[in-house]
Image (tube, rainbow, N blue to C red):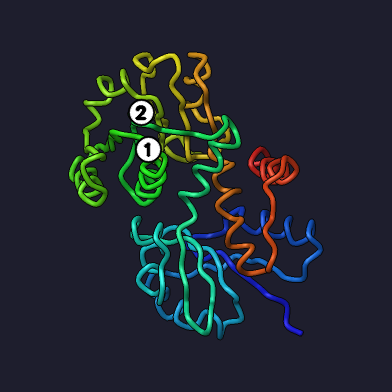
Amino acid sequence: MTIPVACVIGWPVAHSRSPIIHRFWLQELGLSGDYVRQPVAPEEIQAFLKNLAERGYVGGNVTVPHKEAAFAAATEVDAAGQAVGAVNTLWIDGGQLIASNTDSLGFLANLDEKIGPVDGSGRPASVLGAGGAARATVWALLSRGFEPIHVVNRTIDRAEVLATRFGKSVRPASWSDLPRLLRETKLLVNTTSLGMVGQPELVVDLAPLPEDAIVTDLVYVPIETGLLRAARARRLVAVDGLGMLLHQAAPGFERWFGKRPTVTPELRAAVLATIEAQ
């Protein structure tokens, strides 16, 4: 009997911690299977996805730069994937490639775990960045009632495109608008790569934020970014991005291996150890 094997597809993909997560769950649940890294160059992605099952995979995750290509290749895409225009989770069903975007779910589950159920109820939010991660974040925030959602990007044209996609509750803004917007922001989210290891620091003056504001960063390497340090220095609630990575992985694991896993402190510690070692 052939064991099920899933993969994470990216270019590059050597940095991915997804194999650590899924192998941890396979061992914890006593299941047969494996999860591996699969580097695929951009010019090869369509052919690779077309023959995913023939290559021996039951499905996989998709990371940069292939999320939009996977969206285009899928026979069926769930509501979150349709809204975002990109997917991160694939599986084979009846010989067809089915796709989902679980980044939004992971983002909300991380906040709910750290600070309790998050209800936006007309509270303003500000999202830094206008890429694929920002789209998934905006979709998540809209589902919890945050309004308005300001999408702040150095190139305002990209913010305008994102805002047009989601409607009047989402408003484009330039970086120079940020100090003014922060005065009313209840949730600030960094979706850019700024602050990540090897990238420039994200420099934001958090002084205008209200005392009850929440700050979260999708960057998880390092686990404590400059933005989160600045938030904690102001005694604001600060939530790191590792939980999003862990929670977004659970739906795919269930699809591929048949059991729903749980995000536990032990799993977080296992992944965190690799981050700290780096």
Check the picture and name the quadrant holding the N terminus.
bottom right
Tell me which corner region of the image, top left, top right, bottom left or bottom right, holds residue 18. Answer: bottom right
Tell me which corner region of the image, top left, top right, bottom left or bottom right, holds residue 140. Answer: top left
Which mark, by number, is residue 129? Answer: none
At label 1, which amino acid type do we have? Answer: Gly
Q: Residue at x 33, y 40 (%)?
A: 129
Give the residue pinned by disc 2. Answer: 123
Q: Disc 1 on helix, strand or loop?
A: loop
Tell me which corner region of the image, top left, top right, bottom left or bottom right, holds residue 182. Answer: top left
Q: Position of residue 6 (x, y in %)?
A: 62, 70
Check the picture and name the quadrant holding the C terminus.
top right
Return the residue nearer the eye: 118 or 21.
118
Would you place residue 31 above or below residue 227 in this image? below
Counting other residues with Cα less than 10 Å from the Cα at mark 2, is it few (<14), some (14-19), or many (20 or more)?
Answer: some
Return the residue nearer the eye: 274 or 109.
109
Circles 2, 1 touching at the beta carbon (< 8 Å): yes
Counting other residues with Cα less than 10 Å from the Cα at mark 1, is it few (<14), some (14-19), or many (20 or more)?
Answer: some
Q: Position of residue 275 (x, y in %)?
A: 63, 41
At label 2, which amino acid type do we have? Answer: Arg
- Comes first in the chain, label 2 or label 1: 2
Would you place residue 240 above or below residue 41 in this image? above
Give the residue pinned by disc 1. Answer: 145
